[in-house]
Image (cartoon, helix red, strand yellow):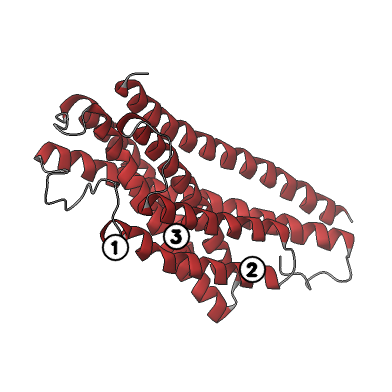
């Protein structure tokens, strides 16, 4: 691998990691919001 | 303060982070001159160094929040500390990964037991232990032990920062190097833009992580209330 390839790999790694982190948090927020809505609906129904 | 950070800073930050990130990358790949000594691989430093500084910042913030939590026992501070450690660990892992890639090109090895590298690895392991402790403990003592661990980790940061001056090391000194380092104005501008990008990304990630932790607690409380309708209100999260 050439030094430029290592540079490119470093930048891709950072961008991909930040993107994956944001994606994971967004999906977790969506799931948790849905679960809260479901639990509150059940609570009101009791 | 935590609510202010979450509602205001995290709303403004994305509008700054995107142009800063694009400007920083344009400078690094098209405008910055190639370092005479280290060659093209030196370009890794423009994101490696800000990543490390932001990692220290996140861990220091986690330490402050942990100390406040130990003093006030308010869950908000504990949650803020955990979110900050998670963001710091992301940046810390990226520091290790990009540093390793640079070491492979410059030193011909992925890792060496240099003072800076070793102290940084110890810091990373301390905060990894923090996260393991958080995931294993579900009683009231867990957050307190974790807060103490975060304080120990934060106190370790000066050791990592000054490792290149305290011990003989082969790790390059990028900033304030009397024998060169980043001295060209374009290099300085690229580093400042990169710092801006990572500094603005950190509160965004922190706010998102803090929200997830808060929602998890809310789910746990609601699940507890639905299972124990009479005992509702006893559980704080």
Residue shown at 56% from the left, 72% from the top: B148
Q: Secondary structure at mark 2?
A: helix
**Residue denoted by label 3:** B59
- Nearer to the camera, B75 or B165: B165
Marks 1 & 3 on one chain: yes
Marking on residue B166: 1
Residue A32 rendering spot, x and y as whole percentages: 68, 46
**C-beta proximity under 8 Å, tags 1 and 3:** no
Q: Say left or right for B66 vs B106.
A: right
Residue shown at 42% from the left, 48% from the top: B113
Label 1 and label 3: CA atoms lie apart by 22 Å
Q: Quadrant of residue B39?
A: top left
> Which chain hosts label 3?
B
Residue A13 rendering spot, x and y as whole percentages: 44, 31
> Which chain hosts label 2?
B
> Which chain hosts label 1?
B
Marking on residue B143: 2
Counting labels gives 3
């Amino acid at each position: 691998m050439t030094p430029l390839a290592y540079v490119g790999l470093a930048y891709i790694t950072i961008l991909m990691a930040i993107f994956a982190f944001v994606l994971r948090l967004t999906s977790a927020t969506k799931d948790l919001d849905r679960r809260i809505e479901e639990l509150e609906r059940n609570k009101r129904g009791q | 303060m935590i609510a202010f950070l979450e509602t205001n800073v995290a709303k403004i930050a994305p509008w700054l982070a995107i142009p800063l990130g694009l400007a920083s990358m344009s400078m690094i790949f098209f405008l910055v001159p190639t370092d005479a000594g280290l060659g093209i691989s030196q370009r890794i430093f423009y994101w490696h160094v800000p990543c490390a500084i932001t990692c220290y910042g996140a861990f220091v913030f986690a330490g402050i929040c942990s100390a406040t939590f130990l003093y006030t026992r308010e869950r908000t501070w504990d949650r803020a500390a955990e979110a900050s450690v998670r963001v710091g660990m992301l940046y810390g892992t990226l520091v290790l990964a990009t540093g390793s890639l640079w070491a492979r090109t410059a030193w011909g090895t992925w890792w060496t037991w240099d003072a800076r590298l070793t102290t940084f690895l110890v810091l990373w392991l301390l905060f990894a232990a923090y996260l393991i402790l958080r995931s294993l403990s579900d009683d009231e003592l867990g957050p307190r032990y974790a807060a103490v661990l975060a304080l120990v980790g934060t106190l370790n940061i000066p050791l990592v920062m000054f490792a290149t001056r305290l011990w003989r090391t082969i790790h390059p000194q990028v900033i304030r190097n009397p024998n060169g380092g980043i001295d060209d104005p374009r290099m300085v501008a690229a580093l400042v833009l990169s710092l801006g990008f990572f500094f603005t990304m950190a509160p965004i990630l922190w706010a998102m992580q803090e929200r997830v932790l808060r929602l998890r607690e809310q789910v746990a409380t609601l699940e507890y209330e639905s299972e124990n309708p009479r005992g509702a209100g006893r559980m704080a999260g």
